[in-house]
Amino acid sequence: MPSTSSPTRTRRSRRTLVGKVRNNIIGPAGVTGSGSTVGFPIRVQNEGRVPVTMAITDNTINESVGFTGINVITTTAGTGATNVTITGNSVNNIDSGHGVLVQQIDHTTAGLNAGTVCAAIYGRTVLASNRDPVITGIVLDFDDYAF
């Protein structure tokens, strides 16, 4: 007779996410909202307590309305680090939000590890022709940090 019991896992598997977002053109220039009106044109979000390594390179983002061009966010990451390289991107005409926003938000219980975010932003990451210069540029927002 076949067993009716559920199988048990005897070891935990080690998960990792490694990826690239590269060589994309998101929205034609000069057409308001063509890049996005309902979400971030490029977003990396780590909520899985796993190590994440992403390269966001050589993309062109035009005309996002209401959303940051490139958004990297980590919440409740535990011991899994989020490593991201952002280089060679052109981010143009972001009507509200930022060109690039990297965030680490601690949603863990006090005393637990919220994870580590490492962002290398360099090269041709250009933020041009934004309509409101007060809300443009590269922003790093870390809710819980130590030196």
Image (cartoon, helix red, strand yellow):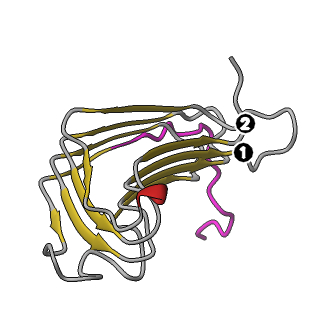
Identify the secondary structure beneath mark 2: loop
123 vs 11, left or right, is left
Q: Which residue is mark 1?
A: 106
Vertically, is 12 above or below 134?
A: above
136 vs 125, left or right, is right
Vertically, is 70 above or below 139?
A: below
| Location of the C terminus (image quadrant) | top right
Question: Residue 2's spot in the image, x, y percent?
Answer: 58, 69
Say which of 133 and 109 sits in front: 133
Of all residues shown, which one is farthest toward the top?
Answer: 147
Q: Which residues are magenta?
A: 1-18
Question: Residue 102's spot in the image, x, y percent?
Answer: 49, 45
**Displayed quadrant of residue 38:** bottom left
Q: Earlier in the sequence, mark 2 or mark 1?
A: 1
Say which of 104 and 109 sits in front: 104
Residue lying at 69% horizontally and 64% vertically, measured from the top left: 5
Question: Residue 42's spot in the image, x, y percent?
Answer: 34, 61
Question: What label does residue 144 carry, if any?
Answer: 2
Are the residues at dot 2 and dot 1 in contact (C-beta closer than 8 Å)?
A: yes
Question: What label does residue 38 carry, if any?
Answer: none
Q: Residues within 10 Å of mark 1 (few under 14, many from 20)?
A: many
Vertically, is 130 above or below 66?
A: above
Question: Residue 26's spot in the image, x, y percent?
Answer: 20, 69
Identify the secondary structure beneath mark 1: loop
Distance of mark 2 from mark 1, alpha carbons?
6 Å
Query: Which amino acid type is marked by label 1?
Result: Asp
